[in-house]
Each structure stands twice: as C-alpha cells, then as structure tokens.
Amino acid sequence: MNKQIKILSGAVIAVALAVGLYFLNTKWIVPATAQRVNAAAKHPPAPAFDLTDINGAKLSLADYKGKVVLLDFWATWCGPCRVEIPSFVQMQQKYAGQGFSVIGVAMQDSPDSVNKFYQEFHLNYPVAMGSSAVSSLYGGVFGLPTSFVIGRDGLIYSEHTGTTSPEVFEKEIQQLLAEKPGSDDGSFMPAGPEQDIDLGTPGEANADVPGVDVSKLSPVELAAFEKQLDQAKCTCGGCKYSLLQCRRDDSTCPVSRKAAKEMLEKLRSDKSQASNKT
Amino acid sequence: MQSFRTLDRTRILPLACGLAAGLLLAARPLGAQAAPVVSGRMVLATDGAHAGSTVKAALVAEVTAGYHVNDHVPSLDYLIPTELKLEAALPLAPGSAVYPKGTARKFAFLDTPISVYEGKLVVGTQIQVAANARPGSYTLKGTLNYQACNDHACLPPTSLPLTLTVKVVPRSVGLKNVNPDVFRGIKSN
C-alpha cells in the first residue's frame, strides 16, 4: 500500500512538474524569446567598422557597445549636413555622461576641410574619414546627411536621410538611453521613420510638396492641390500640422507622403474622368 | 537583448545572417539613384569648322526639377562649384568656359540665399581648330562636374560625361549656323 502511495505521489509530482514546466515555457520563456526575436528582426544589427579618427585615434564601433550612438554620415560641402552639426555638439555635451556618443563619418571629403570644420565648429565627438566600403555596410548612403540611431544593444533603431529636426533625434536618444543594457526593447517607437527613407524620384524632390511628383501639374492645379493639402490634417500622430505643413517641415514623414500621393492620384483621376465626359 | 544572445545562440546566427543578407539586398550604393540629376550634351554653333578657325560650342544641360547645382562661383567657400572641363585632343583645343549667372535661392538649411543653377543650364566655350588640321571628324571628351542638392539633402559630387564631335571641312565648303537659340544668350569671353 505504502509502495502504491509512493508511486502515486511520485506520478503526481512528475505531472505537476511537467505541467509547471509547460506553463513556464509557454507563458514566460517562449514569449520572452519571441519578443526578442521580433525586436532583433525589426532592428538590424549595426555593422561593425574600424576607422581612424581625424586625431589619429582608433575609431571602432565595437568600442561603443553598451552606448547609444548617433552615427552621422555627412560632408563639409553639404549644407543640410552642416546645419545639423551644432545640435549634435549640444547632444554630445548633454548626454555623453549617460552613455551616448555621436560618431561622424565624413564622406567624399578632404581631411583638410574636415579638420578645419572640426576646429571651427568645436566638434566634441569623434569624426573619421569615411569610404564607400563603410557606407556600403550601411546599405549605401543615398543622400547626405544620413544618420543612424543605434541602441545600447548594437541594433539600428532608426535611419534619417536629409535634415532632421534635433527634437526627433533627442526623443529617440532619450528613449534608448532609458533602456538599460539587457532590457527589453519592445517599447521603442522611433520619433522619425526608421528605414526606407529616400529622397524619392528627382520629380518628387521639389520645394512645393516634397516627396510628391507635382511636375506635371499646371500652376493653377498646383495651387489647388496645395490648398487641398493645407485643409487636410496630417494623421502622423500629434503634430497638429496640415498635410502640406507636414510635407514641408518633415519631408521624411511617410504618413503625410502617402496621404499626399493618394490625394494627387485622386485629383488626376477626377481630372481624367472629367475630360472623358467632355 | 544581451540575454537573448545567451538564450539561444543557434537561432541568432541564422537570424543575423538573414538580416545581413536582407540589408545587402536592399543596399543602394553611394550616389545611386533612379536617374542622374543633370543631363545634357555639347553642341556647336556651326555644322562644321575650318582648319585654323575657332568655332563656338556650348553645353546644354537640364537640372532635374527640385534639385539645384552650385554656381560656378559658389556663394560660400565650402560649396562645390559646377565646372565644365574639356580635354584638348589634337587638332582641337578647347577655350575657357563662359558660365551663366546663377539664381539666388533661399533654402531651408541656410539663412541667406545662395547662387545656384536650376532647370536649363547653358555653358559656352570655344574650340580652336589647328591650322594644319586635315578634313575629318574629331572628337573632344570632357565632363560637367557638379554636386546637387535639394532642400533637405545633398547627393555626392559627380560628373556628367560629355563628347563633342567637330567636323573639319575644306575652306571651300561653306558653314551653316546651327542651334541659334542656344548661342543667342551666351556672352562671349
């Protein structure tokens, strides 16, 4: 009898352990792993590079592991790049103590020009001369400036091409600095779009409605289109801009670009239907 | 993050390889774009040239809407000038180029307007034909060097390759003016 009780007890304990392990696995281990897999899939790893900075020191991205990095591809001949630099200097000053650094990679530039600029604008972060090999690691650099925001875990959280507001960078940096190394990164919401940002086709790169090809509109049609965009609200989240303002102030915003393109398409389709009727 | 790597390294490796491959597939090389920002060609003012003469030539280019290239004499010292460069090739010798005055434009990234070329761009020059040139067709090669930007970003400096063929004819053969519209607006050196 005693033996039977022992066997039964053992079986109950074994079943309880199995059930416990099953729940532990399904409720904790698997979701935790899946969440991290998703985070890693969403945010690609920042490719490692080794360069020499303009002061002759080794500049290796691997040395920044555990820090939040703003990797800026820029050039001294690029006006939109130069305008961003003072805010990068400020951010470096403000957040370096929290584990943040800007890294500048000068593209298609001369060391003399970069050195001169470095002194003149009191750059307080490492800058190295780049190469097509380095830019290729980052998927090629289509236009300058192009900046990547890299988390403490070495993953790329956002990519910005073209002049980007310092507030956008700062918001992302603050968010990533708040993440402790080894913590979950699932809550990251990029302040700007994180990938697939481009200048658009040459026809889409215009001052009137950036990102939308308005080259085939007559001046009257363009004015009507702009009015329509100005009357529509941008739904990108809390900016309170009209679609037109959003396009002009943040040309990298994919929400306003898509909406403006759809609006233009509708305008074209209405025009085509009207001409068919006549 | 870090703990994930220790949780299951065997899964990370294929995932990382997949991500790297994806990134490579999506890669756009430096300066790659759908179409060059500037297109153009060289033209002559006459349908041929005589040995020992000088013939007017011009670059007729178009800067894609929404983009600009810098004036040949840039407004700021760090801007890369637009420059026509033609290589001498006997019996042809190019003269200096005559650039148009740029348009003053204000951009979001600068407080002051800068002089740029937008839309149609015509750069004049002259080609000296050597006195001993024999009748025949001769080709000059060159480039238009430029660096383009739009209101928010810049593209790397690049060159538009150019060729110009000059047909040298005997003095007994008359020359006809061609491309008058192009040459009307060019100031001579």
Image (cartoon, helix red, strand yellow):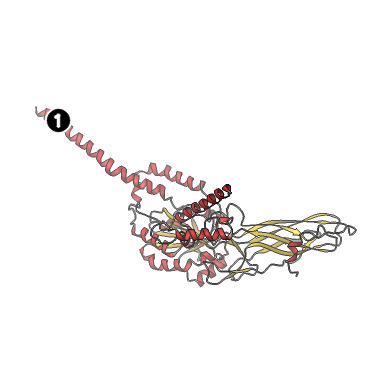
Q: Which residue is mark 1?
A: A8
Number of residues whose C-alpha sits closer than 10 Å to that of mark 1, classed few (under 14), some (14–19) or many (20 or more): few
Q: Chain of mark 1?
A: A
Q: Position of residue A262 (x, y in %)?
A: 49, 51
Decide if residue A157 is on the left or right side of residue B111. left
Total residue callouts: 1
Q: Position of residue A28 (x, y in %)?
A: 28, 44
Residue B9 or residue B178, whichever sits in front: B178
Q: Position of residue A94 (x, y in %)?
A: 38, 68
Residue A195 or residue A205, whichever sits in front: A205
Q: Position of residue B144 (x, y in %)?
A: 67, 60
Task: Using the rendered image of the protein, determine whether residue A146 is visible from the camera's viewpoint.
Answer: no
Decide if residue B14 is on the left or right side of residue A141. left
Residue A127 or residue A276, whichever sits in front: A276
Q: In the orientation shown, which residue stands out farthest toward the front?
A: A278
Decide if residue B164 is on the left or right side of residue B82. right
Going 64% across and 70% down the picture, which residue do you hit? B73
Q: Quadrant of residue A188?
A: bottom left
- Residue type at mark 1: give it: Leu
Decide if residue A54 is on the left or right side of residue A149. right
